[in-house]
Amino acid sequence: MALFELRAAFGRLPRASRGILWMLAAAFFYATLYIAARQSVKNLSVAQVAFFRAALVALLMLPWVWRSGLSCLATRRIGLHALRAAFLYSATLAWVYALAHMPIADVTAINFATPLFTVVFAVFFLGEAVGAHRWAALFLGFGGVLVILRPGIAEITPAALSALASAAGFAAGHAIARGLGRTENANTMVFYLYGLGAPMALVPALLDWQTPSWSDMGWLAVMAGLTLLAQQGLTRALIAAPASVVMPFNFLQLPFVALFGLVLFGELSDIWTWTGAVVIFGSSYHIAQRESRIARRASAAVRDTAE
């Protein structure tokens, strides 16, 4: 009964408040996902963790397929789904490797650059137009990446490059998703993302196979569940309220991760990580605001034309 009352009370909240709460939940789930991934790679290879993440998320999607019927998987764009899955798999490999070899707060901060890479890919591969404001924000954001990496001052490790590569890989997948989203259902896109990614990840995992313990399988299952929960939270936040309202709360991933890293692994984030993260996130937020304004103007223009 209390659960129904809680849901009813949540439904009565203003849309902006609901969006913010969903984003707070997503930020927490993403932060916890980093911990689960770090624990998973302690005893297993990077390739195995990438495989199990994809396979278990696909399995968790099967009840939705069962309820919706096989028609929910109908698509004429399987090639693009496969390409997106390939980018996600590559990005996951790089992300897990980075988590295994550098502080998780640093990986989180560098991954805030994903929206910046997404804009770059959207310009060059989708032909999206970007004005001077967004180009300036892009350059500023990548400057934030340099603040974290400090080339010429600090050693640029393979793990740091992997974190940057993972941000670029996730961004490529996001750019493809922009095109797919015009014709495909969101859940269909998620299922193909992991359902096609699992077979791609199987052979590399078998080549470096170590039999998972029950504890390992528990962490892998938690990681898969958190992946879906985080994606659902992010999606629902963006449905409930504009990106310009909810995206600032996504930055709370970093404090959550920094706290977990300190308590669980004794990792203390330095001032460069925080400074770079603020610059990157501020740039990404500015880009999100500009895109939201442009979308509203385009929508208004369409309505005016229709009238």
Image (cartoon, rainbow, N blue to C red):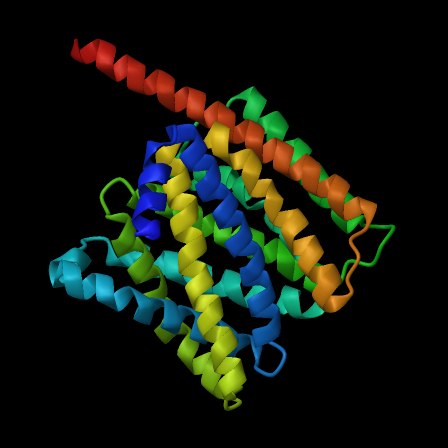
Q: Is residue 207 left or right of residue 151?
A: left
> What's the residue at 70%, 55% (across, down)?
259
Instruction: Please say whether residue 281 is visible from this viewpoint.
Output: yes
> In the rendered image, which quarter is residue 201 located in?
bottom left
Q: Is residue 168 above or below residue 183?
A: below
Q: Is residue 112 above or below residue 134?
A: below
Counting from the top left corner in percent of width and height, residue 80 is at: 31, 54
Counting from the top left corner in percent of width and height, residue 266 is at: 78, 65
> What's the residue at 54%, 61% (across, down)?
33
Q: Looking at this view, name the residue that lies furthest to the front.
A: 1
> In the rendered image, which quarter is residue 100 located in?
bottom right
**Which of 78 and 4 lies nearest the eye of the viewer?**
4
Q: Is residue 186 left or right of residue 19?
A: left
> What's the residue at 21%, 11% (across, down)?
305
> What's the residue at 80%, 50% (across, down)?
151
**Which of 273 and 263 lies nearest the eye of the viewer?**
263
**Which of 207 and 284 lies nearest the eye of the viewer?**
284
Instruction: Please say whether residue 104 is visible from this viewpoint.
Output: no
Q: Is residue 45 left or right of residue 143?
A: left
Q: Is residue 14 left or right of residue 148?
A: left
Counting from the top left corner in percent of width and height, residue 243 is at: 45, 32
Q: Is residue 41 above or below residue 180?
A: below
> In the rendered image, which quarter is residue 106 located in?
bottom right
Q: Looking at this view, name the residue that lies furthest to the bottom.
A: 211
Number of numbered discs overlaid on the protein picture: 0
In which quadrant of the rendered image does the C terminus lie? top left
Counting from the top left corner in percent of width and height, residue 114 is at: 55, 46
